[in-house]
Amino acid sequence: MILKELLTKFDYDVVQGSDECEIAALKYDSRKIETGDVFVCIKGAGFDGHDFASEVAQDGAHAIIVQDDVTVPEDVTVIKVDNTRYALACMSANYFKDPAKELVTIGITGTKGKTTTTYMVKSVLENVGIKTGLIGTIETIIGDEVYKAENTTPESYLIQEYFRKMVDAGCKCVIMEVSSQGLMLDRTSGFKFDYGIFTNIEPDHIGPNEHKDFEDYMECKSKLFRQCKHGIINMDAEHLGHILADHTCDIETYGIKGKYDFTATNIEFFQKPGKLCVKYDLKGKLEMPVELNIPGEFSVYNSLCAIAICSHFTDDTDKIEQAIINIFVKGRVEFINVSDKFAFMIDYAHNAMSLETLLNTLKKYEPKRLVTIFGCGGNRSKDRRYNMGEVSSKLSDLTIVTSDNPRYENPMDIIDDIVVGVEKADGEYVTVPDRKEAIKYAILNAKDGDVIVLAGKGHEDYQEINGVKHPMDERTLISEVMADDEVKAVL
C-alpha cells in the first residue's frame, strides 16, 4: 500500500522522504519490524518508541511516524504529527479498511458494571439472532475464538484488527468495555461509536501511571460522549455534569430513582437454594418483568443498561427476559454450586470500594453469617490492605485473611498489614495463608444460611509469585476441596 492511504483523518508534516512511499505493514512494536514497514513511535509508562527510531530504520522500516524529533538515514520517510497515539488509531482504522463501519459498535464506560453489562448485552443480542463480538477485561470473543485480555481496552491497532476479524466472522455488532485509560491514550479513536454507555463513576485509577486526580479521570470518561452517536446514561449516577459536558450525542436514560426511559420498579431481593436473586418490573420504553440469578441493586442497574441497549435491536421481551435470567459472568458474583445449605460465590472485588459495595449488597439478603475470604496483591499500596481489612471486618461476621498475588513480597507481611485494618473493626477473623486451605476452612466451618464470598481474583487463573504466574483457578481449588474426604463428610 502507499503510506499516504494510511495518513487520513489527521494532520501531518513530511519531515523527510515522501508520503507516496510503499509500505508493507503497520507496526508499533519495534521488535516486530520487517523490511518495508511503517513504524509508529508511541510513548508508554516505561518506554518511548522514539528511542528505537534508529533501530527500526536499520531493520528496514520505510517510514516512521513521530511526534518528537528523531535522526534517521535520509532514505527513511519521517512523518511528524501532534499525537502519535491518535495517529496510530486512525492509521489502524485505515489499515484494516474501517471495519467499524461494517459493525454496530457499542462502548461501555464507568467505574463499575462494565464487564457484567457487556456479557448481558452479548447474551441478549445473540439470543435474538444477532452475532456479537465482545472486547473486555476478561477476554475478547470473536465467534468461536477467544483471546485472553491484557488490558480492559486494547491498543488501537488490536481493536481494529479484532473488528476486522469480527466482520470476517459474520458478526453484526460489537460490545466493548471502554476504560478511562483507553480513552486517555486514544485507543478508541479513529472511529465513532454508534452507542456510548455510562454506568457510574467513583474515584479510582488515581496514581502516577494512571490519572493525576479525579477531575482528570472524569474528563477521560467524558470523551466517550463526544465520540459516539447515541448515549445511554445511568441518571442515578453522580457527577453527570462532568460526564456529559460538551457531549455531542443524543441521550437516553435509565435508573431506579426517577421516571426515565427505562426504570426499574417494585425491586425485590430473594433467594433460591445456593443463590441470591433479584427481580423487578421494567417500566418505560419497554415493559416487562425481569429476574436475575445474581444479587443486588448493582445487578438491577447492569440489567437496565443492557436492556436499554438491546431495545435498539429487538422488542422481543420474552427473549430478552430469557437471556437476562440466565446471565453468567466469570468472576463477577459467580455462584459456585457447593451446597444448597449456604451460598458460595467468587467475585473480583479487589479494593475497599468494590468490596464494601458487594458486602453491603449481600447483607440485604440477611444471611446467617457473611464470611469473606480475601488477600491483597504484593507491591501495591498498603492503604488498600488496611482499608480492605477494615471494610471486611466491619461488614463480615467472619473474615478469613489469605494470600492473593504476593508478587515480590512475603505473603505473611501482606497478611499482617491486612490484619492491621481488620482489627480496626470488631469482626471475627482468622488467617489461613494458603488460599486452597482458606477455602477448605470456610466450607468446613460453614453454617446453614451463610453467604461465603471468595474475593479479589475473580476471573484470574493464576497466582503471581516472584515474577512468575503459577496456574491457579479458584474453581479448580474449590473442586479439589470438595473432593476432600473431610469436606465430603460435612456437605
Image (cartoon, rainbow, N blue to C red):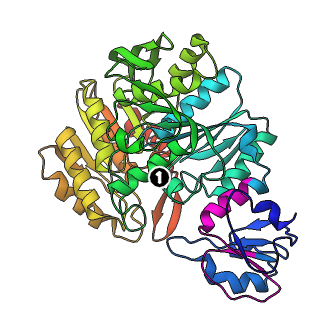
User: Residue at image x 71%, y 22%?
Assistant: 129
The question of residue 90 being in magenta is answered with: yes
Q: Secondary structure at mark 1?
A: helix
Assign the N terminus to one quadrant of the image. bottom right
Vertical comparison of 244 with 58: above or below = above
User: Residue at image x 17%, y 42%?
Assistant: 394
Q: In the image, what residue type sits under mark 1?
A: Ser
> In this picture, which residue range is highlighted in magenta?
64-93
Looking at the image, which is closer to me, 129 or 101? 101
Q: Is residue 353 visible?
A: yes
User: Residue at image x 51%, y 20%?
Assistant: 325
* Rendered location of residue 406, percent (x, y): 39, 64
Vertical comparison of 378 with 262: above or below = below
Looking at the image, which is closer to me, 150 or 451? 150
Residue under numbered circle 1: 180
Q: Is residue 444 visible?
A: no
